Amino acid sequence: MADISETIVPEPSEPPVSSKPSLSSKPPVSSEHPCPICGQKSLQLTEAERDIPFFGKAFLFSMTCPSCKFHKSDIECAEQKEPSRFTFEITSEEDLKVRVVKSAEATVKIPYITDITPGSASQGYVTNIEGILQRVKREIESVRDTAEDDEDRTKAKNLIKKLINIMWGKQKQKIIIEDPTGNSAIISDKAVVERMKAAVK
C-alpha cells in the first residue's frame, strides 16, 4: 500500500479519547480571512491553547473554509522539545485509548500497512491510537472502493481485515511517529522514545 497523504477535508470526529486525565483549554480566538483555495473571504482562522497531561501546554491552529471545505490544522508546543521518534506496540484494545499528539510535520509509520507522510495537506491534531488507525482505515477503504485493479482491491481488503483485528486486540502492531520538530508524542510509559536529528531550516 502506498504512503497516505492526508486529504484537505473537514476534520472527521475521532473516537473518544480517555477522559482521565482530561484536556484543559482556553477559549479559542478566531478571525476571518480570504481563502487561499476559493478566494472567498470566509476562511476562519482559529487558535486555541490546551494543557495536555504529560505533554504540556500546546497551541492548536486551524484554518477552515465553509465555502470550499478547505481545512488545515497544526499543533505546536509552548516549550521547545527535542526532535523525537516514538515507537509503541499495540497489544490490546486498552492500548487504543493511548493519547497521541501529531503535528503536521510528523511521519506516522505503521509497518507492513502504510505510512502517513507530511506534506501540504498534512494535519496536526490530538487524538488516540484508535483515531490514527481509523484514519488509515478510511483511506484504505477509499482505495478499496475506487481501485480499478482487482489486485489493489484485494490488497486493500486484506489490510482492512488486519486493521480490524488490531483494533479488536487480536493482532499486535507497532506504530511509529517521527517528528523532527518535537511537536508530537505518544503519551504512554510503553512508548519507546529516541532522539532524532533536528529539522533543517
Image (cartoon, rainbow, N blue to C red):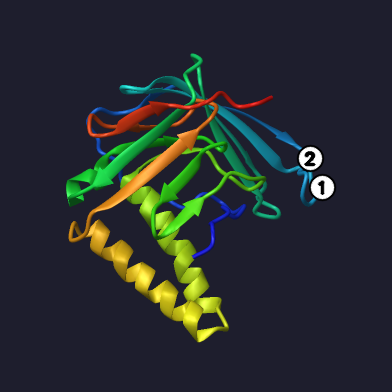
- Quadrant assignment, res 136: bottom left
| Quadrant holding the C terminus | top right
Q: Relative to residue 181, is residue 110 depicted above or below? A: below
**Location of residue 11 in the rendering, given as x and y in whole percent from the top left corner:** 51, 49
In this picture, residue 113 sits left or right of residue 64: left
In this picture, residue 164 sits left or right of residue 195: left
- Quadrant assignment, res 137: bottom left
- Nearer the observer, 173 or 38: 173
- Disc 1 element: loop
Residue 144 in view (yes/no): yes
**What residue is drawn where x is 66% and y is 38%?**
44
Q: Relative to residue 107, is residue 38 depicted above or below? A: below
**What residue is drawn where x is 70% and y is 55%?**
68
The amino acid marked with disc number 2 is Pro
Q: How many marks?
A: 2
Label 2: few (<14), some or many (≥20) within 10 Å? Answer: few
The amino acid marked with disc number 1 is Gly
Q: Report which residue position mark 2 lands on.
A: 34
Residue 39: which numbered mark, if any?
1
Label 1: few (<14), some or many (≥20) within 10 Å? Answer: few
Q: Relative to residue 161, is residue 123 depicted above or below? A: above
**Location of residue 130 in the rendering, given as x and y in whole percent from the top left corner:** 32, 50
Q: Marks 2 and 1: in contact by CB < 8 Å?
A: yes
